[in-house]
Structures are given as structure tokens and as C-alpha cells.
Image (tube, grey):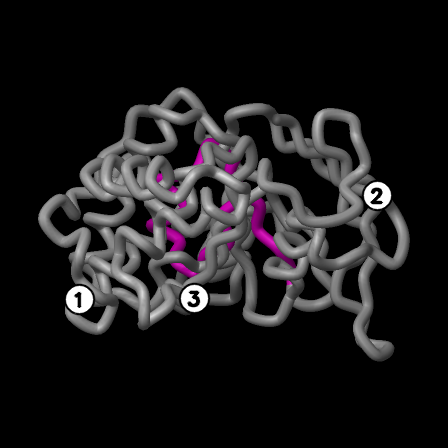
Amino acid sequence: MKLSFENIQKSFSGLHVIDNFSRDIEDGELVALVGPSGCGKSTLLHIAAGLEAPDSGSILADGQPVTGPHPQRTLMFQENALYPWLTLQQNVALALEFQQVDKQEARTQAGNWLAKVNLQGFEAYFPHQVSGGMRQRAALARAFISRPQVLLLDEPFGALDALTRMTLQDALRQLIREERPTVLLVTHDVDEALFLADRILVFSARPATVLREFNLAHHEKTHDLSEFSAIRRQILVLLGIHAEQDNFAKLLEEVGV
């Protein structure tokens, strides 16, 4: 499913958050949004999910206006939002039960999806009985079980330790390869964006405008991102992170600032 943002403007109580954002996200593409905290990245996800309306401009899903939430567009947050009184299997099945799928069928499919994220044997466990990484695996299974055409990810692994985060990134990439949704990923982890994304949009401070776009499609990537070190440096400079003051002027020249 193709997403088209057209001249999006958004303010909250007089605070201008997004300034004239226009971009197409192609069918099956993964686009990462990176930028300072509070610059409007998550607001764009909420607009794409139909949870927020822009003040002006429009968003289209395969040419049709987005006017509210829809099962074809799934939003996943940093918090796993699992119900503590339900087992992992029941939590994952709930996504289908909300769509009027038979309860037994929903739980059968939930078991299959838990196996896909390496949680077989933990179906009857409650969220408090498993680790944070396992809870986030269950949240991934729940996000994918209804086979959404658009997946909106808001810092899904931000609360995890580095090793668990990389493991979950691998799991996410495998699921995306199998299911081929269109994905918008908000992340503050530049390496995560480099590893997962076909394109990276680097945002300015509020109000959000796109400072630079990086196209990484057609690269087969591993967690060794050494071939992207120059792009990584450029992104960090755009974000105002200057590792070596002596090289700052040179780096600014590289990114065209």
C-alpha cells in the first residue's frame, strides 16, 4: 500500500509541529524517520494511522483519503501494551478477535505467530513472567497477525538493551521480508535506521522539515555497518552530534549545510 503525505501542517495549542511535509512512501518500502525529540515524527505516524488529523494537507493510502483508523494500518509503540491479565497467546489473538475472527481460530493463528517470533512454548505465560524482549516479540506477533498493509513503528525497541534490540531488529526484518508491508519507522537509533531502512528522512527541530534524505535501497545489510560510516557521520552532524570539533567544518561541507 502506497502512502502519500501532501503538504501536511500540524500544530498543537499554537505550537507548530510539522511544516508542509510532503512525501510518498512506496508500496513495500521501509522509511525511517530520525530527528530531535519533539520534532513531530510520532505525530506523522499518528496522522498516518488516522489517530490525528492534519490542520491542512492530506494523507492518502493507495489514493484514498485517510480519515480514521483501519485494520490495514497497524501502529506499534515502544511500550508493548500487552494486557497483564491475558496470556501471550490471548494477547496476540485479541488483534483478530477485535475483527470478529472466531476465538479458537484466532488463538490457533496466535500460536503460529508466536512460533514465528521464537516464542513457542511460552503461549500460556503471562507478560510479567517473561523478559522485556519476549514481551516485545509478542507485540511484534500481534502487530503482524492481521497482516496489515501498512506498519507504523514508534521506537519499538527503544526500551531494550543493545543485544536484545539487535535480535529484535533481525526478527522484524525477517517478518517484513515475508509479509512485505509498507513501513514507517520512527527511531532515535541511527544504526537501527541504517540497518532496517530503504530510505532515511532526517528531520529538523520543531517545526519538522526534512533536512536530507538518504536512499539505502538495494543494499544487503548486516549489523556491521562499516560501509555506511560516511552516511552515519552525515546524519549525526545533521542531528547536531559532533564527535570531533576539528572535523566539524569538513562534515558540514559533506552534508551541504
Q: Disc 2 versus disc 1: distance between alpha carbons? A: 40 Å
Magenta-highlighted residues: 183-204
Which secondary structure lies at badge 3? loop
Q: Residues within 10 Å of mark 2 (few under 14, many from 20)?
A: many
Q: Residue at x 51, y 38 (%)?
A: 183
Q: How many marks?
A: 3
Secondary structure category for the residue under label 2: strand
Snapshot quadrant of residue 78: bottom left
Assess whether mark 3 and mark 2 are in contact (beta carbons under 8 angstroms): no
**Residue at far top of view:** 218
Q: Is residue 143 visible?
A: yes
Seen in the picture, residue 57 relative to 91 is either above or below; the reply is: above
Instruction: Look at the image and say whether residue 191 sits in the magenta stretch.
Output: yes
Residue 232, given in percent of the width and then of the height, sits at 39, 48
Q: Earlier in the sequence, mark 2 or mark 1?
A: 2
Place of residue 16 in the rendered image (x, y in percent of width and height, measured from the top left): 81, 69
**Residue at the location (80% across, 56% down)?**
53
Q: Residue furthest left?
A: 121
Residue 128 sits in quarter: bottom left
Query: In the rendered image, which residue does mark 1 sit on?
Result: 131
Residue under label 2, please give it.
58
Question: Of the residues under marks 1 and 3, which one precedes in the sequence?
Answer: 1
Q: Is residue 195 visible?
A: no
Residue sitting at 35 percent across and 50 percent down?
92
Q: Earlier in the sequence, mark 2 or mark 3?
A: 2
Judging by the rendered image, the residue that carries numbered circle 3 is: 242
Observer-nearest of 229 and 112 = 112
**Nearer to the camera, 50 or 10:** 50
Q: Amino acid at mark 1?
A: Ser
Q: Mark 1 vs mark 3: give the one in front.
A: 1
Specify the amino acid type for callout 2.
Ser
Residue 230 tag number:
none
